[in-house]
Image (spheres, rainbow, N blue to C red):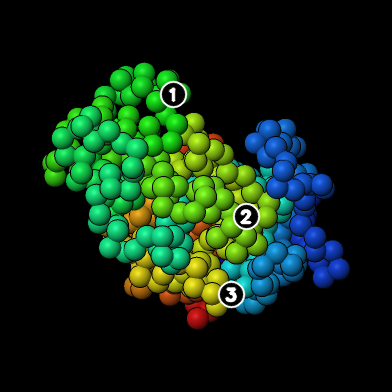
């Protein structure tokens, strides 16, 4: 049951002042690591960073001139602050950050444990959603079209030996790949052996490997299966159609456009950016990705991605299934997740970039709300979405 919890901020601070830190009007600089830039070895640094001694909680975030407009919480402040203090007091599973933006303004910012304002956080499978938006950017610029989403994907690759491809390979489209329904099926032991040979993995050779050694592909096999092959092929399509490399395209046409300067995005063995996972983003920059969804592909009034693509990518395309998790209340789009949350009798559509370990970019269009969360080492008992539904959503729903 969803309840709206109220408590005076002063009481909360006095109870938990030993473990928490509230930013004041003259002291509102979020914790950061000096000297970080885009050339830093973020993965190594992330493993050695010490936990914060005090949590940082700010209901009026500072303007860091990073492309994000800022504001402050109003009547919602006491309730959101109370939740933040509980997180700082380890009353919930451990988080590194919780940020909230509404009406295109960052209104709440908090960091815990290993969280820092300028330290990119590993994104795991949220990387897939960023990859989908890169495809949307290619469509906006004319390197692909919406019609190309339903075109046989083999037509994008000029280096394939078509004679070696498995039966039904020409059935696979970007639409199938980005909804995890390619139909590619390779026995796990065989796939592990194939992926040990770097010579078979460079560039379009990786596509050749997948489409040569898969079982025959048919309408029966093109059902949902969460696997690395599908996003990997998508990134290679992007690399094949844009000028230069996929990595340069993503940097120049998306990251630079959104003033995302401090990040890390690992290259795969195929020579293009990882797609199954591999990106690292700051929490503030995660908010930017969510804002791109909320604003139907616009960034600062510039249409970076077609509205039509955003709508499709975040729609119900496939029904996800998993042996260890009940996805009956979820749908899958183009590497985006979708679910509903309720406040009393009203349902809100929630669109997610979701990474294992606890990375969430939550977009709720009806409330013009974006929530960015980072955590690490979370399992199937992750209660994050439940926490958002019960403790955060009612606050903003009641204020609209």
Label 3 sits on residue: 300
Q: Are marks 2 and 1 in contact (CB under 8 Å)?
A: no
Tell me residue 248's x, y (percent): 56, 50
The residue closer to the viewer here, 35 or 170, is 170
Specify few, some or many for label 1: CA neighbours under 10 Å numbering under 14, 14-19, or 20 or more. few
User: Can residue 252 be seen in this snapshot?
Assistant: yes
151 or 340: nearer the eye? Answer: 151
Residue drawn where x is 15% and y is 35% of the image: 167
Q: Which residue is mark 1?
A: 199
Asked which secondary structure carries label 2, the reply is helix
**Mark 3 against mark 1, which lies toward the viewer?**
1
Seen from the viewer's position, the closer of residues 397 and 184 is 184
Q: Residues within 10 Å of mark 3 (few under 14, many from 20)?
A: few
Residue 317 x, y percent position in the rendering: 27, 57
Residue 9 can be seen, yes or no: no
Q: Secondary structure at mark 1?
A: helix
Which residue is denoted by mark 2 in the rendering? Answer: 283
Q: Residue at x 49, y 40 (%)?
A: 272
- Inter-mark Cα distance, 3 to 1: 43 Å
């Amino acid at each position: 049951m969803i309840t709206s919890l109220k408590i005076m901020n002063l009481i909360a601070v006095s109870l938990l002042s030993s473990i928490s830190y509230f930013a004041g009007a003259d002291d509102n600089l979020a914790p950061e690591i000096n000297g970080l830039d885009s050339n830093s070895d973020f993965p190594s640094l992330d493993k050695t960073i010490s936990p914060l001694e005090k949590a940082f909680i700010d209901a009026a975030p500072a303007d860091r001139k990073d492309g994000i407009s800022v504001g402050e919480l109003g009547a919602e402040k006491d309730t959101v602050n109370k939740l933040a203090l509980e997180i700082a007091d380890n009353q919930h599973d451990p988080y590194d950050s919780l940020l909230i933006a509404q009406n295109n303004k960052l209104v709440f910012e908090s960091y815990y444990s290993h969280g820092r304002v300028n330290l990119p956080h590993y994104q795991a499978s949220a990387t897939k959603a960023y990859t989908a938006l890169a495809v949307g950017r290619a469509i906006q610029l004319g390197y692909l079209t919406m019609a190309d989403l339903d075109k046989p994907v083999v037509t994008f690759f000029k280096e394939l030996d078509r004679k070696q491809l498995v039966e039904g390979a020409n059935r696979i489209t970007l639409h199938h790949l980005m909804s995890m329904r390619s139909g590619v099926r390779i026995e796990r032991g065989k796939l592990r052996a194939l992926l040990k040979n770097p010579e078979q993995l460079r560039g379009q050779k990786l596509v050749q490997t997948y489409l040569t050694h898969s079982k025959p592909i048919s309408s029966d096999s093109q059902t949902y299966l969460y696997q690395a092959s599908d996003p990997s092929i998508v990134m290679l399509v992007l690399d094949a159609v844009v000028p230069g490399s996929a990595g340069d395209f993503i940097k120049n046409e998306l990251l630079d456009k959104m003033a995302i300067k401090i990040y890390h995005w690992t290259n795969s063995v195929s020579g293009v950016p990882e797609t199954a996972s591999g990106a690292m983003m700051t929490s503030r920059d995660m908010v930017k990705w969510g804002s791109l969804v909320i604003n139907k592909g616009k960034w600062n009034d510039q249409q970076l991605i077609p509205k039509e693509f955003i709508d499709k990518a975040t729609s119900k395309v496939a029904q996800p299934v998993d042996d260890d998790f009940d996805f009956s209340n979820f749908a899958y789009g183009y590497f985006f997740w979708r679910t509903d949350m309720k406040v009393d009798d009203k349902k809100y559509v929630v669109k997610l970039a979701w990474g294992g370990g606890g990375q969430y970019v939550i977009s709720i269009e009806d409330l013009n709300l974006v929530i960015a969360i980072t955590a690490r080492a979370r399992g199937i008992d992750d209660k994050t979405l439940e926490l958002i539904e019960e403790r955060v959503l009612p606050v903003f729903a009641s204020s609209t």
